[in-house]
Amino acid sequence: MSTYTQIIYHIVFATKNRQPVLLKEHRDDLYKYIWGIVKKRNGHLYRIGGIEDHVHLLTSLHPAVALSDLVKEIKVASAKWIKENNVFPAFDHWQNGYGAFTSGIDAKDRIIEYIKHQEQHHHSEPSADEMRRLLVEASVRYDPKYFE
């Protein structure tokens, strides 16, 4: 028997102290770079997006790839790429940690649309509030000190 999975992850991570340094004119380059990492690890990236201070990915993983390893690789490699290429001059590094939420295949299109419209969405909800809301919706316990 082979291994079969259908697990979709909605991953969210932020810049250090949620600094608004991911300038719009170069975000697509960052997204393409991250897409390459996911592809290299045999994952499927359904959508990537975000705003100045954080990134959302909707992806599935190869069964042999651990979520934490993929997120670590994305953050380490992209931070190095950003600094070496001076893509976002004010970028220092990614914030420690991340949020990852599993979803069924039936939620895929809804989450893709949500990620597509991050710019508009964040006119009414600050990113830290969004992360708290995602954690509450997923019934994840969290320490409020990380949102002060």
Image (cartoon, helix red, strand yellow):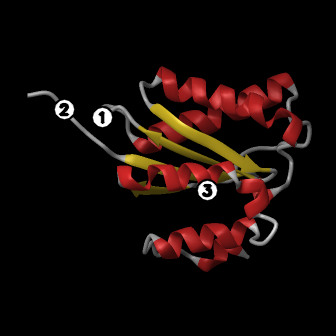
Check the image and report above or below for 60 versus 54.
above
Please provide percent x and percent y for residue 107: 43, 56
Q: Is residue 71 left or right of residue 123?
A: left
Check the image and report above or below for 87 versus 75.
above
Q: Is residue 5 left or right of residue 55?
A: left
Q: Residues within 10 Å of mark 2 (few under 14, many from 20)?
A: few
* Figure disc tally: 3
**Type of amino acid at the residue the image marks with label 3:** Tyr
Identify the mark at residue 3; answer none if there is no mark. Answer: 2
Mark 1: which secondary structure? loop
Q: Residues within 10 Å of mark 1 (few under 14, many from 20)?
A: some
Q: Is residue 23 left or right of residue 49?
A: right
Mark 3: which secondary structure? helix
Quadrant into which the C terminus falls? bottom right
Which residue, as the protein is rendered here, is positioned at the far left?
1
The residue under label 1 is: 63
Instruction: Give the mark nearest the N terminus, 3 or 1.
Output: 1
> For residue 120, which quarter of the picture?
bottom right
Residue at x 78%, y 55% (from the top left corner): 119
**Type of amino acid at the residue the image marks with label 1:** Pro
Quadrant into which the N terminus falls? top left
Please provide percent x and percent y for residue 93: 75, 44
Is the C-beta separation of discs 3 and 1 under 8 Å?
no
Q: Is residue 50 left or right of residue 88?
A: left
The residue under label 3 is: 114
Residue at x 45%, y 25% (from the top left corner): 41
**Type of amino acid at the residue the image marks with label 2:** Thr
Mark 2 or 3: the one toward you: 3
Disc 1 to disc 2, how far (Cα)?
7 Å
Is the C-beta separation of discs 1 and 2 under 8 Å?
yes
